[in-house]
């Protein structure tokens, strides 16, 4: 879904001020307003590192949401809010395959063990299990106390180490939901480090979650319980999907509004 970002990262030049010290003071004030806790929200925010993209590629997928790797980290999957279909991409955003399944309101996708695709239906509050061609296998209901159809289930990720799924409820409340392979809920954690939660992936090497926020335009590295470890701001309009390749130091983010795939270099 398309929502408005809270942060404008452009700062107007202060050419009208003659005194350099005064200009510096004003610049610091603006930066504190943009990136500090007092001007952003009622919650306390930590320091954010700003990431700049290495590449930006146009997608043929309208309103892409969520992102995950396929059989290798050279393959990605995304879903479309517009067509409610699932697309297999390369890392330059080119469509390699459109899966058979057409859903209702797809918002999340993950590939598991190079055998199944799991897709999140936001309004239906369920997860669809598909084969790699998009044929229906099963579906699982996820009980979330939320009456807002447009702020329900968003991202999904799978951890092959502990055999658990990690799902996000976008807003009201923002939740990290941990479930077993039959989608029995094991734990729910209320999230409070961003204004919404729109995409998730897992780095299985470090056993850490990466969560992207659409409204805050942030990427958040977290432990498996959803506690932030490191936070980044990204110059992306409506980021709704994330995939991280720690071995190659690459971070991929998909923009719903722009229909673009952003790639970043990260240090770990």
Image (cartoon, helix red, strand yellow):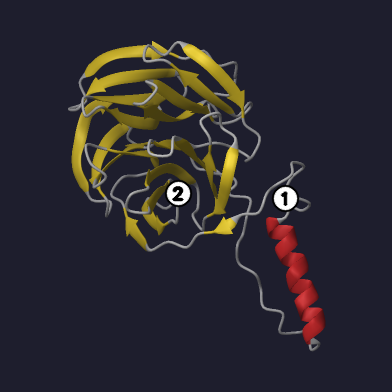
Of tags 2 and 1, which is closer to the observer?
Answer: 1
Q: Secondary structure at mark 2?
A: loop
Q: Residue at x 77, y 80 (%)?
A: 23
Q: Secondary structure at mark 1?
A: loop
Callout 2 touching callout 1 (CB < 8 Å): no
- Among numbered discs 2 and 1, the one appearing first in the sequence: 1
Q: Residue at x 47, y 63 (%)?
A: 52
Q: Residue at x 45, y 56 (%)?
A: 267
| Residue at the disc numbered 1 | 40
Left or right: residue 232 compared with residue 61: right
Does residue 103 appear in this view? no
Q: Position of residue 76 (x, y in %)?
A: 28, 42
Residue 117 lies, with reference to residue 7, above or below; the image says above
Residue closer to the observer: 49 or 43 = 49
Q: Position of residue 116 (x, y in %)?
A: 24, 24
Residue closer to the observer: 111 or 92 = 111
Does residue 208 appear in this view? yes
Mark 1 closeness class: few <14, some 14–19, many ≥20 residues within 10 Å: some
- What mark, if any, has residue 164 been given in the picture? none
Q: Residue at x 37, y 48 (%)?
A: 246
Q: Position of residue 186 (x, y in %)?
A: 51, 14
| Residue at the disc numbered 2 | 257
| Quadrant of res 18 | bottom right
């Amino acid at each position: 879904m398309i929502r408005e970002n809270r942060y404008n990262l452009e700062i107007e030049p202060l050419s009208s001020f003659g005194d350099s010290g005064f200009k510096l003071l004003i610049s610091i004030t603006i930066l504190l307003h943009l990136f500090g806790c007092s001007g952003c929200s009622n919650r306390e925010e930590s320091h954010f590192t700003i990431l700049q993209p290495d590449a930006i590629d146009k997608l043929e997928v309208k309103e892409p949401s969520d992102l995950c790797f396929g059989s290798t980290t050279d393959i990605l999957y995304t879903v479309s809010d517009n067509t409610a279909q699932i697309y297999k991409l390369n890392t330059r955003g080119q469509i390699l395959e459109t899966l058979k399944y057409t859903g209702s309101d797809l918002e999340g996708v993950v590939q598991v063990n190079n055998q199944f695709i799991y897709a999140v239906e936001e309004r239906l509050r369920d997860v669809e299990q598909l084969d790699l061609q998009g044929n229906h296998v099963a579906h699982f209901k996820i009980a979330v106390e939320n009456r807002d159809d447009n702020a329900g289930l968003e991202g999904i990720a799978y951890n092959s180490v502990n055999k658990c799924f990690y799902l996000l409820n976008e807003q009201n409340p923002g939740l990290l939901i941990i479930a077993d392979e039959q989608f029995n809920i094991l734990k729910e954690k209320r999230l409070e480090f961003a204004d919404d939660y729109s995409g998730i992936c897992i780095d299985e090497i470090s056993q850490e979650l990466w969560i992207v926020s659409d409204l805050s335009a942030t990427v958040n590295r977290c432990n498996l319980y959803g506690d932030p470890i490191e936070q980044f701001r990204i110059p992306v309009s409506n980021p709704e999907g994330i995939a991280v390749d720690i071995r190659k130091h690459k971070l991929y983010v998909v923009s719903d509004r722009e229909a673009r795939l952003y790639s970043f270099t990260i240090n770990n």
